[in-house]
Image (cartoon, helix red, strand yellow):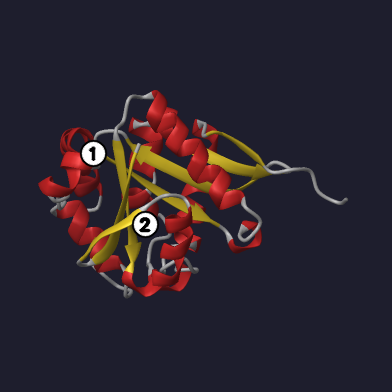
Amino acid sequence: MSSSPFLIRQAAERDRAALSEICLKTANAGTDASALYSDPAYPGLRFVMPYAIFEPELAFVLEENGHILGYVVAARDTAAFEQRLQRDWWPGLREKLADRRALLPLDEGVLDFIRQPQSKEAGLLEQYPAHLHINILPQAQGGGQGRRMIEAELEALRRAGVTGVHLGVSLKNEPVCAFYERLGFRLLHRSQAIYMGQIL
């Protein structure tokens, strides 16, 4: 018995550097994207920091022996969250990164999104207004921690009065869809990603 049990707790401001690093280490369809971004902060600026800052009560981390090994974040109202970011998040990043150019393969996707954010399809949001993101480092995968984290997030969304939630899966990471199906998600549609949803 060499290690203490994993702890799932609400994310704190002190965790943000770890959140950004985990996002980078899982940003290539669940694998390490460190060699694919010229700035290690890029994926986190899009996929995790806005949630930690603007929806902190729905941001949870997986911790073992003081080390953060995963996170799950969510927005309870996707449309309202997008509007908030249009006002309070993307403009500051556009100014800060105005002179940046894509140097490595995945830079362009993040920089283009920051400069011209895309909204989710309105039809998707009618039944599934919330959305979530989860990322876990490989050493913490496979032991049921992902299920525990998703269940913690779904319970937090229910307490917040959310009626439905969706998520997107990379087309390169389709095998993970079976995991979400076991947790009650169903396939909604495929486009640039695989979208799955659950009524709460």
Question: Element type at marker 2?
Answer: helix
Q: Nearer the viewer, mark 1 or mark 2?
A: 1
> How far across and down, in percent of the image, does residue 103 sit?
30, 73
Residue 17 seen in the current view = no
Q: Which mark is residue 52?
A: none
Q: Nearer the viewer, residue 120 or 11?
A: 120
| Marks 1 and 2, how far apart at CA | 23 Å
Q: Nearer the viewer, residue 127 or 110?
A: 127
Q: Nearer the viewer, residue 122 or 17?
A: 122
Question: Element type at marker 1?
Answer: loop
Q: Residue at x 45, y 51 (%)?
A: 134
Which kind of residue does numbered mark 1 sit on?
Pro
Which kind of residue does numbered mark 2 sit on?
Pro
Relative placement, left or right, of 91 versus 104 is: left
Q: Residue at x 33, y 25 (%)?
A: 161
Above or below, 123 relative to 32: above
> How far across and down, in percent of the image, does residue 24 sit?
45, 60
User: Which quadrant holds the C terminus?
Assistant: top left
Q: Which residue is mark 2?
A: 43
Badge 2 local density, few (<14 within 10 Å), some, or many (20+)?
A: many
Which image quadrant for residue 191? bottom left
Q: Earlier in the sequence, mark 1 or mark 2?
A: 2
Q: Which residue is mark 1?
A: 129
Above or below, 62 relative to 105: above
> How far across and down, in percent of the image, does residue 82 sit?
19, 40
> How far across and down, in percent of the image, does residue 60 sit?
51, 37
Q: Residue at x 24, y 34 (%)?
A: 77
Residue 93 seen in the current view = yes
Relative placement, left or right, of 79 versus 148 is: left
Relative placement, left or right, of 49 versus 128 is: right
Q: Nearer the viewer, residue 110 or 194?
A: 194
